[in-house]
Amino acid sequence: MTGPSPAERLVDLLNLEEIDLNIFRGRSPQESLQRVFGGQVAGQALVAAGRTVDAARPVHSLHAYFLRPGMPGVPIVYQVERVRDGRSFTTRRVAAVQQGRTIFNLTASFHHPEPGFEHQLPMPDVPEPETLPRLADEIREHLGSLPVPFERMARRQAFDLRYVERLRWDASELADVEPRSAVWMRAIGSLGDDPLVHTCALTYASDMTLLDAVRLPMEPLWGQRNFDTASLDHAMWFHRPFRADEWFLYQQESPIATGARGLARGLIFNRSGQLIVSVMQEGLFRAAGARPPGRQPGPSGPQR
């Protein structure tokens, strides 16, 4: 007897429990990770906001801050503030709370679609996803087999990831590498037909690889890690309807990294070449094991 597909598990993860007016509770699976995946918190927070808005007004932008690391296995409560319900735009603020502490803040704006002029940058000319190896297969080919932790992660992974360029495994391969990366993605299995689920699923996926572009010039993506990394903030603009269970290209680049922080921006195209989402994120890149200036490690480990 087969269990639920990775896509079905993702849909279940995004299916929040409404426990009171404007208050929702989300599961946080018990993982071997030190903190809850940021894309999960962002996706669940957007579900909470979207549940309080008329479906005729899809989200057009979100701006969020990751304030504290979430604890795996502990439920997260999402408190929604109905900031504004205008004639064309609706605004919501969401606080994600875990064990009485706010770990994440999100502001989302929803807009009733209107006609207008159009232009967009062209999609890069890249190989089709079917011609590229799956991430797990590329790692397995290099290492001979998947490490046990990655094998478990690969079985639970809700998205098929295929990097446009081959992975680099050693610092000697990084000479003249530009801070750019591109990856094809799609959910593994059907996500159903609710547009909000597809939007929140892509929000989940948008945090998976965006900071790759920052790391590329200084360390291999899948080799030895020299830096502790954490997402600091996240912003997205949704331009067109889409399905997250169909292939989309995530083109990523980093215009700057300085002061232990790196900025990344991404453009997400559907397979027809339409620009569907734009993304910006800043991440913390601190030398592995280094202490934050002016702080001592607390009982839960290093702090930002």
Image (tube, rainbow, N blue to C red):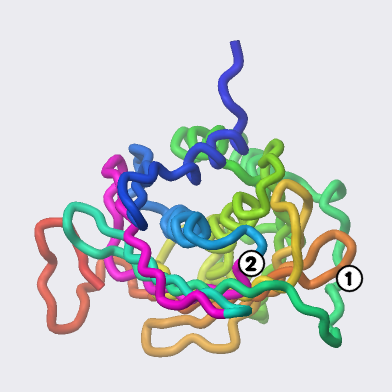
Frontmost residue, 222 versus 46? 46
Classify 59 as above or below 147.
Answer: below
Q: Which circle marks residue 125 in the picture? A: 1
Residue under label 2: 57
Q: Which residues are magenta?
A: 58-86
The C terminus: image quadrant: bottom left
Classify 120 as above or below 98.
Answer: below
Q: Amino acid at mark 1?
A: Asp
- Identity of the residue drawn at 39% across and 42% down: 17
Comparing labels 2 and 1, the label whose residue is closer to the camera: 2
Q: CA distance from mark 2 to mark 1?
A: 33 Å
Q: Residues within 10 Å of mark 1 (few under 14, many from 20)?
A: few
**Place of residue 264 in the rendered image (x, y in percent of width and height, measured from the top left):** 56, 78
Give the mark nearer the N terminus: 2 vs 1: 2
Frontmost residue, 54 versus 151? 54
Q: Which circle marks residue 260 in the picture? A: none
The N terminus: image quadrant: top right
Frontmost residue, 145 versus 111? 111
Q: What is the residue that sits farthest to the front in this orientation?
A: 87
